Image (cartoon, rainbow, N blue to C red):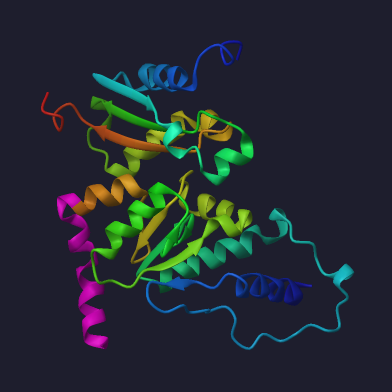
């Protein structure tokens, strides 16, 4: 918890997904500025709300997209409850990504 | 008590008619009996605990009765979020009728939908009662041709009705 204030949300998302999914590729991009006019963003004054997440992990093997997205959402439930508003998720297996 | 609660639910939703892609249908507003016997002070308060179940029933009914159901921010003709906008744009590529509810108008409905689907964000799309996912997934299915396949029977039936 102590690290909360220090690390950006992007870094927290990244390290959470990294340790749980052991991805071969992980990219987390903060795109909150694109949603600055968003009603929910204005109301909360929160400025780390929208992220693009790309994860390539063999842990997605055999799971459909809904299941893969749920895996990511479940890992980030703390963030979702503390102001993370939306994620754009690309979740692929290494094979699908041509690795 | 139970009766007035359900009436309250109906009244709540009369205020938020289900939007269809072309025509607006207000399916929960038909012939509502007024309730003059109950003073406002004595009607049950609208709390999550008391109404959550009923709201989930509404969601259940929505996805059962509407071949393409989207819970979104804003309405199809005026989305209030880029992701909702994207999902509607994708769905409009097909000729299937789209039914929608605006979750920004009702935080309790929003929570009920989340609980129903076990999915934390919006938009949420259901096709033939099946949970499809959000905007990333619908776009993915559009690009892969999977969405066309899923909507085929709905579009075909629509053609026959007209």
Residue B55's image quarter?
bottom right
Residue B141 x %, y %: 22, 51
Q: Which residues are magenta?
A: B143-162
**Quarter of the C terminus of chain A within the rendering:** top left
In the rendered view, would you say B99 is above or below B83?
below
Residue B147 x %, y %: 22, 58
**Is B84 on the left-hand or right-hand side of A7?**
left
Residue with the most extreme left position: A98
Residue B65's image quarter?
bottom left
In the rendered view, would you say B129 is above or below A3?
below
Q: Main secondary structure of the magenta part?
A: helix
User: Between residues A54 and B8, which one lies in front from this camera angle?
Assistant: A54
Residue A74 x %, y %: 45, 34
Q: Residue at x 34, y 54 (%)?
A: B87
Magenta stretch encompasses residue B151: yes
Disc tally is 0
Residue B37 x %, y %: 86, 83
Q: Residue at x 23, y 26 (%)?
A: A58
**Is A73 on the left-hand or right-hand side of A98?**
right
**Quarter of the N terminus of chain A within the rendering:** top right
Magenta stretch encompasses residue B18: no
Q: Residue at x 58, y 51 (%)?
A: B111
Residue A45's image quarter?
top right
User: Between residues A39 and A19, which one lies in front from this camera angle?
Assistant: A39
């Amino acid at each position: 918890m102590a690290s909360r204030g220090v690390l950006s949300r992007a870094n927290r998302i990244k390290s959470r997904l990294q340790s749980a999914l052991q991805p071969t590729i992980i990219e987390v991009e903060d795109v909150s500025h694109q949603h600055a006019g968003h009603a929910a963003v204005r109301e909360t004054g929160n400025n780390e709300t929208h992220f693009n997440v790309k994860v390539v992990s063999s842990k997605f093997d055999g799971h459909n997209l809904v299941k893969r997205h749920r895996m990511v959402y479940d890992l980030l439930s703390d963030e979702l409850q503390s102001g993370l508003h939306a994620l754009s998720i690309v979740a692929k297996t290494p094979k699908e990504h041509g690795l | 008590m139970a009766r007035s609660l359900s009436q309250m639910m109906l009244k709540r939703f009369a205020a938020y008619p289900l939007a269809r892609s072309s025509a607006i249908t207000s399916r929960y507003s038909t012939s509502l009996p007024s309730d003059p016997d109950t003073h406002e002070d004595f009607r049950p308060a609208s709390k999550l605990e008391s109404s959550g179940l009923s709201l989930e029933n509404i969601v259940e009914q929505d996805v059962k009765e509407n071949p393409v159901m989207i819970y979104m921010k804003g309405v199809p003709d005026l989305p209030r979020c880029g992701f909702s906008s994207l999902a509607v744009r994708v769905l409009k590529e097909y000729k299937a009728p789209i039914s929608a509810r605006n979750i920004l108008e009702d935080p309790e409905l929003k929570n009920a939908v989340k609980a129903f689907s076990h999915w934390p964000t919006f938009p949420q799309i259901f096709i033939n009662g099946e949970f499809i996912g959000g905007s990333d997934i619908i776009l993915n299915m559009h690009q892969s041709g999977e969405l066309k396949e899923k909507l085929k029977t709905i579009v075909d039936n629509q053609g026959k009705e007209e």
